[in-house]
Amino acid sequence: MKDKLVLIGNGMAGVRAIEELLKYDPDLYDITVIGEEPHPNYNRIMLSPVLAGEKKIEDIILNDLDWYEDNDITLVTGDRAVKIDRVRRCVETESGKTFDYDRLLIATGSKPFIIPVPGADLPGVIGFRDIADVDRMIDYARAHEHGSAVVIGGGLLGLEAANGLMKQGLDVTVVHIMDSLLERQLDATASAMLKQSLEERGMKFRMEAQTTEISGDGKVERVHFADGESIDTGLVVMAVGIRPNIELAQSAGLYCERGIVVSDTMQTYDPIIYSVGECVQHRGECYGLVAPLFEQAKVAANHLAQVGTSHYEGSITSTKLKVTGIDLFSAGDFHEQEGDDVLVMQDARLGIYKKLVVRDDIIKGAVLYGDTIDGTWYFSLMRDGTSIADFRQTILFGQHDLGDAGHGEAARVMSLPDDAEICGCNGVCKGDIVNAIIDKGLFTLDDVKAHTKAASSCGSCTGLVEEILASTVGEGYDAAPGVKPICACTDHSHDQVIAAIKEHELKSMDAVREFLEWKTPDGCATCRPALNYYLLANWPEEYHDDPQSRFINERAHGNIQKDGTYSVVPRMFGGLCTADQLRAIADVSDKYQVPEMKVTGGQRIDLFGVKKEDLPAMWKDLSEAGFVSGHAYGKAMRTVKTCAGKTWCRFGTQNSTGLGVKLEELTWGSWMPHKFKLAVSGCPRNCAEATIKDFGVVCVDSGYELHIGGNGGIKVRVTDLLCKVETEEEVLEYCGAFIQKYREEAHYLERTAPWVERVGLSSIKEAILDDEANRKALYERFKLSQKYAQIDPWKQRAEGGDAYEFTPLKIA
Amino acid sequence: MSNWTKIAQLEDIPRLGSRVVKTDTMDIAVFRTGDDRVFALKDECPHKKGPLSQGIVHGHKVTCPMHNWNIDLEDGCATGPDEGCTNHFPAKVENGEVFLQLPL
Ligand code: SRM
Ligand SMILES: Cc1cc2nc3c(=O)[nH]c(=O)nc-3n(C[C@H](O)[C@H](O)[C@H](O)COP(=O)(O)OP(=O)(O)OC[C@H]3O[C@@H](n4cnc5c(N)ncnc54)[C@H](O)[C@@H]3O)c2cc1C
Ligand code: SF4
Ligand code: FES
């Protein structure tokens, strides 16, 4: 018989834990869920837009009744758990039912704090917590056209309530005891800007006001303040804070302080009783936002599923106000202390204010008002503790090309119309994304990618999609977690895998998966190519490449075309060619009836539309004419683009073509985390576009400028200058060392541009410029790996290698 | 109709890989999984007809090389949230030989 799991509290955190548990093992437990509210699990966050009339209740259901049924979950709604009997291991409900448990999960959330002033118990005084509260507010507004309401509390919840009531047609006054709104989320300047713009919309404020009494005859009629003044109203919403629901746990003898105290494994003092959500106190903190609660849910599920590998270590949270038309973001500690640096940008006319609190080049806190597009970026820099030293001068301007090729103003996604195209690759519009987030209850970027396909191809719109996600679900949005697993097959990040391969000398894919406890027997299309690359890069002499773990282009050594044919791009070193070579290409093209030829953007020739079966024979002919593979299909060294240079050009300062050929001879064949391109320009006019390459050389009269980390693709990035050297030998050495550092340390599918930004230019300079011995060692390791990489894959296959790949089976 | 046709030795198909069988009417992709089972699907992704034989095989699934849909090898259907199916054909291994039931 299966063990019984009972969940008390049919809310966001508890049900999320069940969902995570089902992912591990759908059959481990008989599950019962007890919920006091008469509804299935819904998205509480969205109550604000429901109140504002922007959404309906049906839109915000996260798990409908069918979901419980499909997963064989017994659901009890409209009934309260009133007793936990830890000796008999059962839960009793108000209506007298009892449920036995082997494991119990308490997720009772919290309730609004009601200030204990006289009259606080009068009908018409409510909190803002659940569907019933929202119904009451809307009913009141309908019954009292142009009536008035008072919201006590100028925090996030209070302002969202006030905004919603205003939208319902009421005259709303917000009463706040402090002198500035959202004092825990905003500094004084941003707070004043917020207040002004809410006032412009018609919201009224009574600041530094202490409520002393609520009076009325059988229902609310008036609110009184300490200064003797009062306001007439029939509705008072208390939004002054929440209190964790701990009474039930407390009465069962579980240790509680402010919340139910849990360990890093989300266990209470009774180890078979777990707890997650707002009712919990972990390492002294209680959380009131969804993102950390979902992290808790994940950890609890991991232990309930008896995997027992993950730990919850607390969360840093960020805040966003969900009032349409007001952009506000804050995170971390934004009240500066002595020794902190404060970076501020302010434009009153545009209504923009940005402030970052920085200590030792690490962001400690951020407040953004009016322009919050970079909130998620600052937040992830803060969470990851990334040094901002290299881009400190411009950081306040934002990650201005936020994941797209300079869409600039269009990046202000939330002001875009619903039919604005966000994902150019898959034709996904903003409205599609917003609807999917709401209808399907999505909280993570991965979910949105899977359901809408947005950001799932070239990825250039990832930033925009994240912004839509963040704006739609508020801070409940699950920003990229601190350590992001490679894929669903593992909990380990790229860095953790790379480190384990090195430290524990893991030399096969099976060894990696076993050591790191992979969840799937043979990985997936995301992790297998990554592991194959890491093993190859670390153990060039020993590891045998696994063709079945390579994307088809690399397995077949050509680019697969939309009709299933392949393209063939022979290498032309430095873009140079001879008449004989061109003739040979022309002959091959005739012989195999190549439908189309084209000069590529990489200074060589592409033969399109070749049948897979013809590839080995065609390669044989090319090989005999002296060509090797151009690796135009690989996460590999691609091309070295060159210009005319000193030999011909009147401005040339060095032999750029010759140096390009030498660089290509050094580097061809090398497998990389992502594609890698080089260029050599003969003078600063830079005709070879060296400053948008992964490694670019700009020749000058006195030597060679070396540039790194450029990218001309999805998101254009100009290189950083690494250094200047005097001889060609040095160019080769620095280039090899840089490549090897990238090969050893970058994440699979991370190009040099994002890699340089992630690890910082300074760290690369330290490793390559300041430490000569290290540079030479890197260069030696690169040359060693090249011994094994510079075996032309086309020639190998022309001679019969991997023949099965290119020949169909014949029916016997 | 239920005639089993021998098409290959098991070792002709790379583990976690596939081979194509060309018939008069269509290409059939024959997959070999990590646990040495074989599956046969019409070599056409339900999305935009990408050649599934060229995908990466993992578990009892293949990831289409064109736009990364995951297709279940057992029934030829896309796994959630994508939707669509391609034809699947019975396949078996006996004494190290692979047999298919080909469509007539
Ligand atoms: C053939 C070529 C276009 C041409 O006819 O000129 C080409 C073709 C493809 N490019 Fe490119 N790129 C080609 C030059 C470029 C250039 C220009 C250059 O290298 O100077 C760029 C911008 C420079 C850069 O990379 O920094 C370029 C940026 C991209 C990107 C965006 C990369 C990025 O990091 O932003 C992709 C997508 C990717 O790699 O994920 C891409 C991907 C592709 C793929 C492989 C798409 C795919 O995955 O199937 C295209 C294959 C077409 C096909 O069916 O054969 N191609 N691609 C060029 C081959 C050059 C060569 O000789 O090898
Ligand atoms: C209007 C509003 C807007 C919000 N906006 C945001 C936002 O933008 N971003 C964000 O991150 N967070 C937001 N929050 C907070 C977020 O909704 C909560 O942090 C989250 O819902 C807490 O999840 P939980 O599971 O701990 O509690 P809940 O979701 O409250 O679930 C607890 C459930 O347990 C039930 N329960 C309690 N006691 C018992 C019992 N004895 N027996 C049976 N059932 C019981 C309750 O009725 C409730 O349904 C908002 C909250 C509100 C009210
Ligand atoms: S060749 Fe490059 S730019 Fe052109 S369609 Fe293909 S990926 Fe896009
Ligand atoms: S054709 Fe297979 S995923 Fe698009």
Image: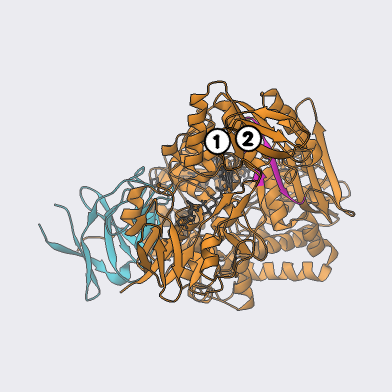
Direction left: furthest residue: B1
The label on residue A215 is 2
Where is A361 relative to A688, above or below? below
Tell me what residue is drawn at x 73 percent, y 67 percent. Answer: A779
CB at mark 2 closer than 8 A to ligand 2?
Answer: no
Of all chains in the rendering, the one displayed in cyan is B
Residue identified by numbered label 1:
A124
Looking at the rendered structure, the kind of residue marked 2 is: Ser
Mark 1 touching mark 2, by CB under 8 A? no
The label on residue A442 is none
Colour mode of the rendering:
by chain
| Residue A615 percent across, percent down from the top left | 42, 54
Q: Are marks 1 and 2 on the same chain?
A: yes
Label 2 crowd bin: few (<14), some (14–19), many (20+), radius 10 Å: some
Mark nearer the N terminus (1 vs 2):
1
Looking at the rendered structure, the kind of residue marked 1 is: Gly
Q: The disc numbered 2 marks a residue on which chain?
A: A
Say if the magenta span includes residue A325: yes
